[in-house]
Amino acid sequence: MRTHCRFLHKGAILLPLYIYGFLVAMIISYLTTPFVKKLAWKVGAIDVPRDARRVHKKPMPRLGGLAIFIAFIIAGFFVLPFEQASIRGMFVGGACIVVLGVFDDIYQLSAKVKLIGQIACALVLIAFGLKIEWLTNPLGGMMYLGKLSIPVTIFWVVGITNTLNFIDGLDGLAAGIAAIAAFAMMLVNLSLGEANAVLLTALLCGSALGFLPHNFNPAKIFMGDTGAMFLGFMLAASAIEGAVKSATAIALIVPILALGLPIFDTAFAIVRRLLNGKSIMEADKGHLHHRLMARGLSQRQAVLYLYFISFSLGVCSVILARIGFKEAIIALTFVICMLFFSIRYLNVMTETKKSTHGM
């Protein structure tokens, strides 16, 4: 019997297990965040605005991702099958990425140290047998990666981990987009019958949504690298466990589209910095949310607009999971063209004010 088809019965309440996990994670995340906020002030995990790129004007606690992690872990103990190596690997790898994030939120680690740490966390997943072993062959069928599965998996996990970290620039933006992407991936995994991935994405969605009331503008706490890296890492791992592991013809297209907004924003940021002779690790004010605010939108308006784009991409990913590979490529090409027109309209490939180092 599939895990996501099991029901929890308590009194007169019948709930599918993934809905139960979602609700438990959301409630725990919401209730835990105020305590994490106090902890952040005590340990010095504070974001002090030091340059013009920062939108907020006063010091803010930034350890909020710890509440997301705690909610995910506690809810996970109730619903996830820990007898499976891949699930244990995600918990160990997720715990490692959180430790890395906590140290960065307190001590401001260098980009090189964070990258090494992210690669090490990706290797944890691989050690537990969670890796991308199949890719779609454009000429038809599937292609077995063999030894290439290790570098491909590392690239995927580290890449997605950083895309969510890059887009975490406005109150509630990264948490909301992570929740939308997790929900879309949950629906796709339901259609594919990938029970573990359904539960994982439900937990991630609930944990992010529970944190969001504390983080939406005006934010009381930031998720910091602890939250952004954990959500990105777990979304990447969940994609491997779900759509990618199912070895369907559109395996990688679905999670890429569900996470389309942060992926495209990061890709354009890298290209923009290279074209302007900058290091790809050097921050600027060219991200989509910066451009929207430069055009007169408030923080809330910019975030809601980007939520809408992310939701639209999520809907597309759910639809693509139900159609053939050729149709998916056509639809994806259309979506990418629309994004390019939007990018051009917002001038995200041009240089703006000189910035300081950092993401």
Image (cartoon, rainbow, N blue to C red):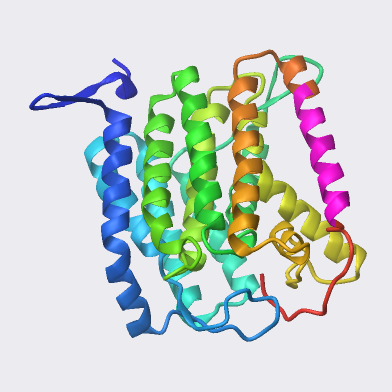
Q: Percent position (x, y) of residue 153?
A: 61, 43
Q: Residue at x 55, y 55 (%)?
A: 174
Give 317 or 96, whichever is nearer the viewer. Answer: 317
Question: Based on the displayed image, in which of its 4 quarters is residue 332 positioned?
Answer: top right
The region drawn magenta spans 331-346
Q: Percent position (x, y) of residue 84?
A: 33, 34
In which quadrant is the N terminus drawn? top left
Is 302 drawn above or below residue 131 in the view shown? below
Q: Percent position (x, y) of residue 54?
A: 64, 76
Q: Residue at x 74, y 64 (%)?
A: 296
Drawn side of residue 339 relative to residue 37, left or right: right
Is 149 drawn above or below residue 5 in the view shown? below
Is 227 drawn above or below residue 42 in the view shown? above
Q: Residue at x 71, y 15 (%)?
A: 141
Drawn side of residue 73 relative to residue 115, left or right: left
Residue 334 counted in the magenta span: yes
Q: Is residue 126 visible?
A: no
Q: Percent position (x, y) of residue 247?
A: 59, 22
